[in-house]
């Protein structure tokens, strides 16, 4: 499995279309499989960074 962090929507679409448009298959949550069976997750860098940062469970005021 491979993860690609993209900087903008155009880059996300370019990677996605290159994989899926050349014999790959779409899946959910940004995952697709190329024609050789390798899985890729194409996701915006800002989303990956936000998920990696997590949250502060002790701060109820932000919710």
Image (spheres, rainbow, N blue to C red):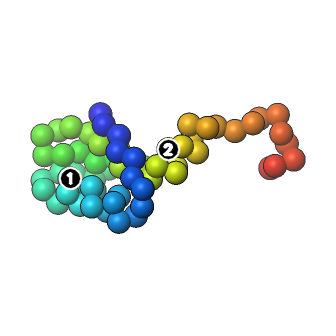
Residue 3 shown left or right of residue 52 in the figure: left
Quarter of the image where one finds residue 56: top right
Q: Please, is residue 45 above or below residue 36 in the view?
A: below
Can you give x and y, in whole percent of width and height, for residue 9 in the image? 40, 64
Residue under numbered circle 2? 48
Q: Is residue 60 above or below residue 44?
A: above
Q: Nearer the viewer, residue 27 or 40?
A: 40
**Secondary element at tag 1:** helix
Q: Nearer the viewer, residue 33 or 56?
A: 56
The residue shown at (35%, 40%) is 3
Alpha carbon separation for disc pair 1 and 2: 20 Å
Residue under the point 30% across and 37% down? 2
Residue at screen point 42% across, 61% down:
8
Helix, strand or loop at disc 2?
helix
Task: Give residue 11's position: percent from left, percent from top.
Answer: 33, 60
Q: Nearer the viewer, residue 45 or 19?
A: 45
Which quadrant: the N terminus?
Answer: top left
Query: In the image, which disc is placed on residue 19?
Result: 1
Instruction: Count neighbours of disc 2 (C-alpha within 10 A) and say few if under 14, some if 14 to 19, many if 20 or more.
Output: some
């Amino acid at each position: 499995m491979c993860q690609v962090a993209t900087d903008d929507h155009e880059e996300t679409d370019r990677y996605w279309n290159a994989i899926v448009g050349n014999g790959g298959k779409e899946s959910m949550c940004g995952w697709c499989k190329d024609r050789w069976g390798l899985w890729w997750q194409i996701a915006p860098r800002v989303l990956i960074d936000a998920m990696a940062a997590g949250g502060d469970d002790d701060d109820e005021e932000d919710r």
